[in-house]
Image: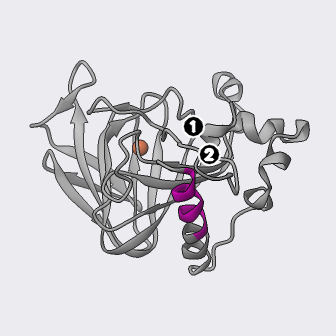
Amino acid sequence: MNRSQVNAILKESDAFIRSFGHILPPFAYWSPERMRAPDAADIRARGLGWDITDYGQGRFEELGLFLFTTRNGTVEDLQRGRGMLYAEKIMITRTHQLSPMHRHTVKAEDIINRGGGDLVIELFGPDETGGIDRAAEVVVPCDGTLRRLPAGAHLRLTPGESVTLMPGLWHAFWAEKADCLVGEVSTVNDDRTDNIFEMPIGRFSEITEDEAPVHLLVSDYP
Ligand SMILES: [Fe+2]
């Protein structure tokens, strides 16, 4: 996708998030130069900040997701079993904009409808090799209650509702009725290594630099 499109999505996403009374942390508004400074090394290393992806396919409206990582622990803490073992993101999924079928090996995540339209999540369990089991029932915790669903069910979360997705569980999601503000509270998150997609696609966008970046994306840090 073009940098001009990324810049436009940054602006409209910030306005959408603010419309719910949710405000991003100060580093969201740092210039590219500020974000490249030595004292921002920890923010870059943890992968905090803007993350706009079309999964490398160039069709953001149909296949894409807006994310902003607000906090993220470290793999070292995770291996030690104590410390900052958690992460948090705020996301926007648009009506009928697909976040494609994927699973995580390490990360457990709560996906939360923070407001707007309905969030619809398609779910499959893993088979013995980690692939998609198209027959087995799926059992997921939803706000303190276990829900039993047939394979491939479309779990509909209205504003305020959430689901816990454990590692290995296959999921894809999109919004219906209106664009949706989505929260994610999870285990330490490494998006470079912990996303396994059903389709042969990437996790990040390929950017064509047709104008200067307003803010860097997480994928611009390396
Ligand atoms: Fe996920």
The residue sitting at the front extreme is: 210
Residue to which mark 1 is pinned? 189
Does any atom of ligand 1 lie closer than 8 Å to the CB of label 2? no
Identified at 81% across, 40% down, the residue is: 36
Hey, what amino acid is under mark 2?
Ala
Amino acid on which disc 1 is placed: Asn
Q: What residue lies at 74% left-to-right and 38% top-to-bottom?
A: 44
Residue placed furthest toward the left: 135
Task: Name the secondary structure under disc 2.
Answer: strand
Q: Is residue 61 left or right of residue 133?
A: right
Judge whether residue 146 can be spotted in this image.
yes
* Residue 207 locus on image (x, y percent): 53, 42
How far is disc 2 from disc 1 in space, using C-alphas? 6 Å
Assign the magenta stretch its main secondary structure. Answer: helix
Q: From the viewer's side, name the closer residue of 86 and 68.
A: 68
Q: Nearer the viewer, residue 42 or 28?
A: 28
Q: Earlier in the sequence, mark 2 or mark 1?
A: 2
Q: Are marks 2 and 1 in contact (CB under 8 Å)?
A: yes
- Most extreme residue toward the right, as rendered? 39
Query: For the residue with label 1, is its CB less than 8 Å from the closest atom of ligand 1?
Result: no
Disc 1, SS: loop
- Look at mark 2 in the image and give the residue it sits on: 87
Do we see residue 83 in this rendering? no
Which quadrant of the structure image shows residue 83?
A: top right
Look at the image and give the residue range highlighted in magenta: 3-11
